[in-house]
Image (cartoon, rainbow, N blue to C red):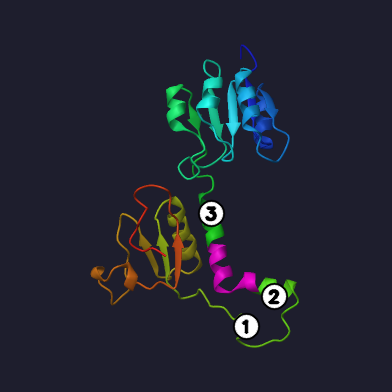
């Protein structure tokens, strides 16, 4: 390495940054947990850093790319994507010919796992029950009142948006109980339960639980099953 490459990270990423240092990079990290000021990011880029590591919190636009013209080699985003948060201006990056990267698919299983846990919590009214306990409002036992909730066993779950996370959700549901009825919506039609035809439409599917995983693109806006 002819010279130590300089990297500025907008937050502490732990072992990932330690690995860069071991490989000879000069790594400077913003020390506070909050988002660094935009002016500081521009200042660091203008100082001649080779790489900028960002998170979804920072807006990286023409001002930042212009400050790094001729010196900044890459903007590495510590996040899955750009579409949802849109914090990196791809047009400005292309204009100044500075590449940018992301970390695709690292949170697919994590997000699906959270979705499945939330499904159980909502069905069983766990959040409401915990609140009653914390406020010392649970004064008696009753077989159904006030928070019996509902089982998810044997129910039908609708997954709207069959991307990576939607598919991971289906796998988790099927691992627990293979015969769970699963409806899904995307480019492919729903798999309707017995007794329904394809003309019935999503409104007549009446799933017991509905899971939406929608990105901000034309294919998922104004879909057939709102609400």
Left or right, 122 with reference to 155: right
| Residue identified by numbered label 3 | 111
Q: Position of residue 97 (x, y in %)?
A: 45, 22
The structure residue drawn at horizontal position 35% and vertical position 48%, both measured from the top left corner, is 218
Residue 146, numbered circle: 1
Q: Mark 3 falls on what kind of element?
A: helix
Q: Mark 2 falls on what kind of element?
A: helix
Q: Position of residue 47 (x, y in %)?
A: 64, 18
Q: Nearer the viewer, residue 164 or 127?
A: 127
In magenta stretch: residue 73: no
Residue 183, numbered circle: none
Of labels 1 and 3, earlier in sequence is 3
Labels 2 & 1 near each other (Cβ < 8 A): yes
| Residue identified by numbered label 2 | 132
Furthest-top residue in this view: 2
The Cα atoms of the two marked residues, 2 and 3, are separated by 28 Å
Q: Nearer the viewer, residue 36 or 185?
A: 36
Viewport quadrant of the N terminus: top right
The structure residue drawn at horizontal position 65% and vertical position 16%, both measured from the top left corner, is 4
């Amino acid at each position: 390495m002819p010279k130590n490459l300089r990297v500025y990270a907008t937050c502490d990423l732990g072992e990932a940054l330690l690995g860069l240092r071991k490989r000879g990079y000069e790594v400077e990290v913003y020390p506070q947990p909050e988002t660094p000021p935009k002016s500081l990011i521009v200042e660091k880029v203008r100082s001649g850093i080779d790489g900028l590591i960002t998170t979804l919190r920072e807006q990286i636009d023409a001002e930042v790319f212009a400050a790094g013209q001729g010196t900044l080699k890459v903007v590495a985003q510590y996040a899955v994507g750009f579409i949802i948060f849109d914090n990196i201006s791809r047009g400005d990056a292309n204009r100044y010919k500075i590449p940018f990267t992301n970390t695709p698919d690292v949170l697919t299983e994590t997000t699906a796992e959270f979705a499945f846990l939330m499904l159980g919590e909502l069905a069983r009214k766990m959040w409401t029950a915990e609140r009653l306990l914390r406020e010392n409002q649970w004064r008696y036992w009753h077989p159904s009142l006030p928070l019996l909730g509902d089982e998810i066993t044997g129910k039908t779950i609708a997954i709207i948006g069959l991307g990576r996370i939607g598919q991971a959700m289906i796998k988790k549901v099927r691992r627990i109980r293979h015969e769970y009825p699963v409806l899904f919506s995307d480019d492919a039609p729903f798999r309707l339960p017995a007794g329904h035809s394809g003309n019935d439409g999503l409104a007549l599917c009446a799933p017991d639980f509905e899971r939406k995983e929608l990105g901000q693109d034309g294919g998922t806006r104004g879909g057939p099953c709102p609400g």
